[in-house]
Image (cartoon, rainbow, N blue to C red):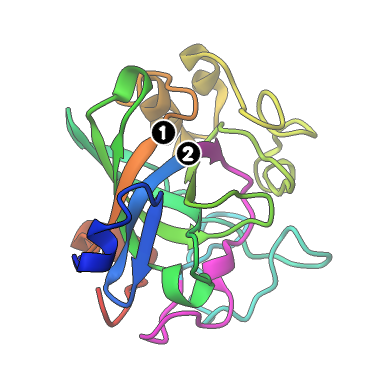
Amino acid sequence: MQLTTLATLALPALAGLASAQGASGSGQTTRYWDCCKPSCGWAAKTDSGKLIGTCSKDDQPLNDNGATASACDNGGSAYMCSNQSPWAVDDNLSYGWAAVRINGQTETTWCCACYELTFTSGPVSGKKMIVQASNTGGDLGSNHFDLAIPGGGVGLFNACTNQYGAPSNGWGAQYGGISSRAECDGFPEALKAGCYWRFDWFGGADNPSVQFTQVTCPSELVAKSGCQRSSG
């Protein structure tokens, strides 16, 4: 929870505030699914020594303490697990994962942390999503949440062709991915539900803006990723 002080009250225009207790502010979203091993699945970057789980080419947990190189690196064979796809808890709340960049912080403070996003634009305006930070990206802006959504575009890297036989630039456009729900029908079974989520609960929203605040991770996210910070 962000602590309120006289200093923060005097600076209401700040887009994001970071402290030892967490971060909050306004932010932006994009979407991706590149099938690569998430950055927070490398050597432990958390205060708990835990890391995001990764999977083999056939989508089985590696349980290797992060030792296997990413499939997006030469000779690597670790991939993003399909169970790190978003899902709806109810009509107004979803859970999922994201590549994250928080103003004034580093991976050692955001890896495996969770953030409640309140969407402030588009068809999901007013809905909430709690995401766990599983990744980062050199192309992300400040207070940026790149939502992990199957079919959301591979972006800079692509292991989906090797893992699932996706087209050379991934499914759909390299950035942004597919453009219709019907395209999800041809996806690997393990990724279909997350793909449909984008057009169902998410309403096909295109990079909506958010207000965010760091929160304690729901047990459902921790159970799937295997990662939690000591601070929650």
- Determine crowd level at label 1: few under 14, some 14-19, many 20+ residues with C-alpha closer than 10 A: many
Q: CA distance from mark 1 to mark 2?
A: 6 Å
Element at badge 2? strand
Q: Is residue 83 visible?
A: no
Q: Which residue is mark 2?
A: 29
Amino acid carrying label 1: it is Ser
Magenta stretch in the rendered image: 29-51
Contact flag, marks 1 and 2 (Cβ < 8 Å)? yes
Task: Name the residue located 17 percent from the left edge and 27 percent from the top edge.
Answer: 91
Is residue 151 positioned above or below 225 on the image? Answer: above
Q: In this view of the protein, which residue sits in the foreground, 105 or 175? A: 105
Q: Which mark is residue 209?
A: 1
Task: Look at the image and say whether residue 79 sits in the magenta stretch.
Answer: no
Give the x, y percent position of residue 100.
Answer: 50, 56
Q: Which corner quadrant of the image does residue 214 belong to?
A: bottom left
Task: Name the residue located 37 percent from the left edge and 66 percent from the top edge.
Answer: 18
Q: Which mark is residue 220?
A: none
Q: Is residue 177 left or right of residue 4?
A: right
Amino acid carrying label 2: it is Thr
Q: Which corner quadrant of the image does residue 69 belong to?
A: bottom right
Task: Name the residue located 69 percent from the left edge and 41 percent from the top edge.
Answer: 155
